[in-house]
Amino acid sequence: METQNDSIRTIIKSDGKKYSIRNDRRRFFFPEEWNIFIKTVTNDRTKHLFEFMINTGSRIDEALHIRPKDFDFERNNVRLWKTKTMAKKGEKQGKPRTLSLSSEFTRRMKRLCSDIPLDEYIWKTTLNNINQIFKRKLQKAGIKDWYNFSTHNIRKTHGMYLKALGIDIGEICMRLGHDVNTYLKHYGSADVFSDKDMRQIKDILGDIYMRQRRF
């Protein structure tokens, strides 16, 4: 049995259990929404987790497995080593991805990692706890359709921002661990962003790619 409103479909299984499916799974943060949301996160460690995701496009599980030793602070990059296994493609384990970071975000992560042992996870929390915090902060930020968001939408936001900045689609797919067809299916047009949005996007992502162009 299935019921729905404009935003959420509720599926009732034969055993009576209910679960919800978001209708708008392409929802992303406009930059002003992101800036308002991130200001509501007062715990520094949790804020760094959400900022890590917007700066890398990582999945939440990939982010929760990051350790200080996964960063190369000299080269401004991070290695995602616990990645999604694409079973349909015959993978038996996920393929690690090394991603560039902005110089400013690298400095912030270096300060965060300064008192954490190299082999320890930076974010010692559970997926359920992070999801609950995320939902509360969305509502506090006044995001009207907060129910259309999961932490995965931070990843979609990263992909949309890179597309808006004109980054090559192959590079975007490498960062996200997608193939081109998957990217085209799940990400919308970047022309929705205004000039003001573009300035804010550049402030959020910093010099992830611009610094390479100086050499």
Image (cartoon, rainbow, N blue to C red):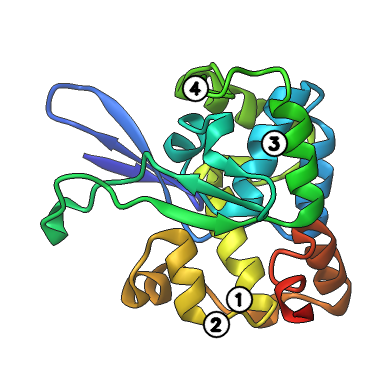
* Label 1 sits on residue: 163
Instruction: Please name the amino acid that badge 3 sits on.
Output: Leu
First in sequence, mark 2 or 1: give its number. Answer: 1
- Amino acid type at circle 2 is Asp
**Residue count near mark 2 (Cα–Cα under 10 Å), binned few <14, some 14–19, many ≥20:** few
Which residue matches tag 4? 119
Q: Nearer the viewer, mark 3 or mark 4?
A: 4
Image-based side of 207 in relation to 136, left or right: right
Up/down of 129 relative to 172, above or below: above
Q: Position of residue 184 (x, y in %)?
A: 41, 77
Q: Is residue 172 left or right of residue 43?
A: left
Nearer the observer: mark 2 or 1; the answer is: 2
In percent of the image, x 52 and y 19: which residue is there? 120
Residue 79 versus residue 170 in the image, above or below: above
Residue 138 image label: 3
The part of the image, by quadrant, that contains residue 168 is: bottom right
The quarter of the picture where the C terminus appears is bottom right
> Would you name the residue on which mark 2 appears?
168
Q: The N terminus is located in which quarter?
A: top left
- Viewer-side residue, 107 vs 39: 107
As helix, strand or loop, the secondary structure at mark 4 comes to loop
Residue at mark 1 to residue at mark 3: CA–CA distance:
24 Å
Q: Nearer the viewer, mark 2 or mark 3?
A: 2
Give the mark nearest the N terminus, 1 or 4.
4
Q: Residue at x 33, y 32 (%)?
A: 19
Give the CA distance from mark 3 to mark 4. 32 Å
Front residue of 57 and 136: 57
| Total residue callouts | 4
Contact between marks 3 and 4 (CB within 8 A): the answer is no
Q: CA distance from mark 2 to mark 3?
A: 31 Å
Q: Residues within 10 Å of mark 3 (few under 14, many from 20)?
A: many
